[in-house]
Amino acid sequence: MKIAVASGKGGTGKTTLSCAMAFAAQEKVTLLDCDVEEPNSHFFIRPEIEHQEQVFRPVPAVDETKCTGCGECARVCQFNAIVTVNGKTLVFNELCHSCGACVRICPTGALHEVDQPIGQIETGRRDHVRFVSGRLDVGQAMSPPLIRRTLEQADAESLTIVDCPPGTSCPYVTAVKACDAALLVTEPTPFGLHDLKLAVETIRDLGVPFGVAVNRMTEEKNPIQAYCEAEGIPLLIQIPEDRRAAEAYSRGEPINTVMPELNERLAQIPEQLKAMI
């Protein structure tokens, strides 16, 4: 089972919950850090890295001796990654989505694909937690190819927790749609509620079962709880706002090391989500 830990905005506590759930699990578990633009799960897992792998994606290259400047490649490209100007074909790799349509349609065979490095994947382990993290190279604009490659490292025979990118754009969709269920992490603020609504709308379109976790919960009136009740969304866990958690986070420690009372609830979340599938 693959569980996506996601949110509509950054800073809600996805990594905090992902790492805490991994340590609270009563079985072997794989944690995939798919927030490849700024991965930080390793600060809390502190794994012993066993393997590093360079990741590439195919992009088109032009053989000018064969190119006639017909413009067919530019016509078929849906992302404006290729243009033909004065009979010369130019490729903009930053816009390319590696679909391969331009290579297949070129009538003279002037286009071929070459591998472009986009990032790295690190694999390690700590106790019962197998850790995999993708890291996008500086300057690269396309994170979904690296996210998909990181998701391929999931263990089909054990629980996999996916620390997803924030927001509701392509990286979020790429990570969430590959999972069996999702835990949407939010905070009891107007911004948290606003972006939770966006995340809920998107995940419902994807058809992925989900529940909600509220982080930094206070005793004040909680707009998240009222929203979840109105929408029929399961509220699976509420993490109280606690100085112990903030101090543990600043030291790079999972919150359940200082709040062990959370372990039982965290360990129940995978079963609760599994029941929704």
Image: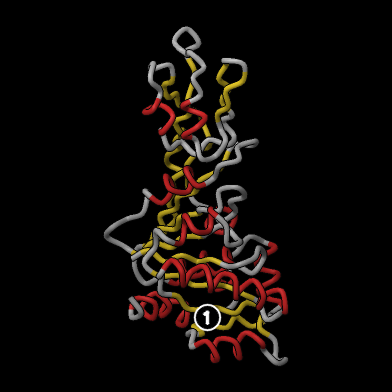
2 shown above or below 144: below
Foreground: 195 or 106? Answer: 106
- Residue 144 pos. (x, y %): 50, 47
User: Secondary structure beneath disc 1?
Assistant: helix
**272 or 105: which is nearer to us?**
105
Residue that appears at 66% across and 78% down: 193
Q: Residue 268 location, x and y as percent?
A: 41, 80
Indicate the position of residue 39 as horizontal and vertical percent values.
Answer: 58, 51
**Residue type indicated by callout 1:** Leu
The answer to which of 257 and 99 lies nearer the viewer is 99
Q: How is the image coloured?
A: secondary structure
Q: Which residue, given by chain and number where applicable, does mark 1 sit on?
A: 262
Return the x and y of residue 219 as percentages of the image width and height: 70, 91
**Residue found 54% across the figure and 91% down from its top:** 229
In percent of the image, x 53 and y 74: which residue is there?
Answer: 200
Residue visible at 48% across and 43% down in the picture = 146
Which quarter of the figure has residue 247? bottom right
Quadrant where the N terminus is found in the figure: bottom left
**Quarter of the view holding residue 222:** bottom right
